[in-house]
Amino acid sequence: MGAMKRFAARVDITHLPGVADPQGATVERALPALGWANVSELKIGKSIHLVVECADVAAAEAQVRAMCERILANPVIEAYDITVHELAAR
Amino acid sequence: MSVRVGVVQFPGTNCELDALDAFDRLGAAAELLWHGDATIRGVDAVIVPGGFAHGDYLRTGAIAQFSPVMGAVRDHAAAGGAVIGICNGFQVLCEGGLLPGVLQKNAGLKFLCDTVEVAVVSAASALTNATEVGQILRIPINHFEGNYTCDAATLAELRADDRVVLRYVANPNGSVDDIAGICNAGRNVVGLMPHPERASEAILGSTDGVVLLRSVLAAATTPAIPG
């Protein structure tokens, strides 16, 4: 097995289109009172940050995607977006 | 011989003793099942009770579905045994794929603690076999994520197959189609947000939950209701 590299991954989880996001809607409604009346499509989700050791970036992405499908996101109501980049060697 | 009811206890579960007591009062032999043990010790029915299993971290039920006991619960369900998820237990069964859909945050973004009316929609399930369709039950709810949702195809299937077992009379949480409880295709796995164990004695303000608990005991002694 070749040397493993370290990758930082960020998973952004948001509601699927059409799924109610009452938190986002409430915050959006609060903004005009503070003078920002030009904001729309506000969504509140969550982000998960992690470091994974893999042979290459494709393997890292594949693993994080599998983790999203299995546990990190619930595909019934949530969409996820994965960003992976290699960390400098220690 | 008494019916043996196993009540699953995760770290963060908080309704397990209420469930034990309610079933014991009905003459069952109820016992706790620790989530870390990969067995249900041969019980006749499994209750996944309310609470905050594993702190509800990530999502409600998301971590609990991987607890060692859940493999044995799945085997019991696959063999036609009664498995009832109450409140957080409903969330765990949905996350674990034993029931379709998911419980999301209440539409009003408020934690709800109230006694509500639910109507029996189907009397053909492990939770409702002793009830009559149309029967109205007053049972407490106590949840922040009780807003049931699923995709349109799943909802159509639930309706077509008479798998919506309980509906709210006045929808408190935004749940799709006023759903308070559903069952699986085999009708032996049922999830509901209301807490029947909290409506099991007059001193609690309602005894309307008893008929549901009795249904569970009846299903446990005659498993494998045809689906």
Image: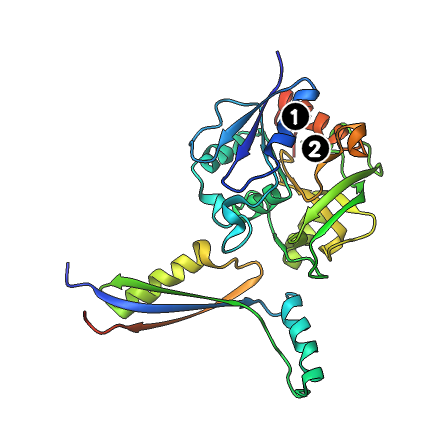
Residue B226 or A72: which is nearer the viewer? A72
Q: Mark 1 belongs to which subunit?
A: B
Query: Where residue B147 sits in the image (x, y, percent)?
Result: 68, 54
Q: Is residue B1 above or below residue B120?
A: above
Q: Is residue B30 above or below residue B106?
A: above
Residue A21 visible in the displayed image: no
Q: Could you tell me the amino acid type at mark 2?
A: Glu
Q: Could you tell me the amino acid type at mark 1?
A: Asp
Residue B199's image quarter?
top right
In which quadrant is the C terminus of chain B drawn? top right
Residue B21 got which mark? 1
Query: Where residue B1 sits in the image (x, y, percent)?
Result: 61, 11
Residue A27's image quarter?
bottom right
Judging from the image, what secondary structure is the residue with disc 1 in?
helix
B155 left or right, relative to A84: right
- Give the colour scheme shown: rainbow
Instruction: Categorize mark 1 by other alpha carbons within 10 Å: few (<14), some (14-19), many (20+).
Output: some
Extreme residue in the top direction: B1
Q: Mark 2 belongs to which subunit?
A: B
B101 left or right, relative to B74: right
Tag 1 or tag 2, which sits nearer the N-term?
A: 1
Instruction: Categorize mark 2 by other alpha carbons within 10 Å: few (<14), some (14-19), many (20+).
Output: many
Residue B197 got which mark? 2
Extreme residue in the left direction: A2
- Disc 2 and disc 1 in contact, CB within 8 angstroms: yes
Residue drawn at (49%, 40%) of the image:
B11
Residue A22's image quarter?
bottom right
